[in-house]
Image (spheres, rainbow, N blue to C red):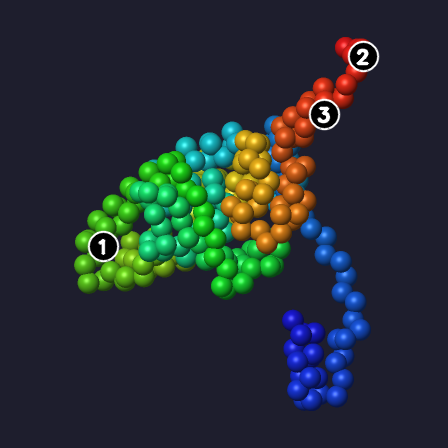
Amino acid sequence: MLSSALGTSFKQKRIKHNSAEHVELPAVRRVRPLVWTDERVARWRETGRIPGPVMVWTPLLAGRFLDACVDERLYPLYHLVTTRGLRRGEACGVRWEDSDLKVTKTLGVLESDDEDDDGLKSDSSWRTVALGDENAVPLTAWRARQKRERLAAGERWVDTGLIFTAVDGRALREEYVSERFAAIVAAADLPPIRFHDLRHCAATIMLAAGIDMKVISATLGHSRHSFTADVYTSVVPEVAYAAAEATIPAIPRATRRA
């Protein structure tokens, strides 16, 4: 950012030299997600130590989380993020006018750089996220609830047009969404992850389910398919095991030993 500012100033002849022109920035090490395997969970319970800064639940743990928050007011939001991988800013910013719960069952999302993965998003970037019945049903129930809250609020209601709002229609405070998530995780005695890591959970669950990498990349809104593959290919043990099992039989052999 500083280099860009100095470069612009130099072109406009506001300064005589761009001091950042020959600065070499250090390489940034990308932190890869780690799965909460049974062994890591057991070790965490013994020591309280979290293996890495970015942790991902297995499908089993993700299911336990959704079961634990099914009665929460924001359950549809948490379900959407866990299964479709929206960023926090995207989930809090989606609007009813960009959704179709009856016919195509899709959601138009303005891509947010909230805790972004690759920093390649722009304010004009949109993507369409398929919801499916499993997300359309709770969102339909949520819409009915929101209408009841609007009637209860009366003149205090703030018409933001947002799907997920506070009880008076105002935009959700994003920090609250994360704070409430952390409280649910702690109450359910689940191994801890950040709210943003639900996005990684969605990616790895889709990968474990056999979804094509390009589809996963488009669902998450990654600008580069290679980024998705680089980050998630080695994350889910089940995927790596399935690849190993499928590779050996593909090699023609006259004899095959046990």
Residue situated in front as seen by the camera: 7 or 71:
7
Kindly identify the amino acid type of the residue bearing the numbered disc 2.
Answer: Ala
Vertical arrangement, residue 84 with respect to residue 161, above or below: above
Residue situated in front as seen by the camera: 165 or 176:
165
- Residue 190 position, x and y percent, is 51, 35
- Residue 134 position, x and y percent, is 39, 36
Quadrant of the image for the C terminus?
A: top right
Vertical arrangement, residue 5 with respect to residue 91, above or below: below
- Residue 213 position, x and y percent, is 60, 40
Q: Secondary structure at mark 3?
A: helix
Apparent side of residue 31 relative to residue 129 in the rendered image (left or right): right
Quadrant of the image for the N terminus?
A: bottom right
Which label number is shown at residue 150? 1
Q: Which residue in the structure is indicated by mark 2? A: 254
Q: Crowding at label 1, few (<14), some or many (≥20) Cα neighbours within 10 Å? A: some
State which quadrant residue 215 falls in. top right
Apparent side of residue 54 relative to residue 251 in the rendered image (left or right): left
Which mark is first along the chain, 1 or 3? Answer: 1
Q: Crowding at label 3, few (<14), some or many (≥20) Cα neighbours within 10 Å? A: few
Q: Nearer the viewer, mark 2 or mark 1?
A: 2
Q: Is residue 32 visible?
A: no
Vertical arrangement, residue 251 with respect to residue 236, above or below: above
Q: Nearer the viewer, mark 2 or mark 3?
A: 2
Q: Crowding at label 2, few (<14), some or many (≥20) Cα neighbours within 10 Å? A: few
Q: Secondary structure at mark 2?
A: loop
Q: Which residue in the structure is indicated by mark 3? A: 247
Q: Residue at x 58, y 51 (%)?
A: 222
Kindly identify the amino acid type of the residue bearing the numbered disc 1.
Answer: Arg
Which mark is first along the chain, 1 or 2? Answer: 1
Kindly identify the amino acid type of the residue bearing the numbered disc 3.
Answer: Thr
Q: Secondary structure at mark 1?
A: helix
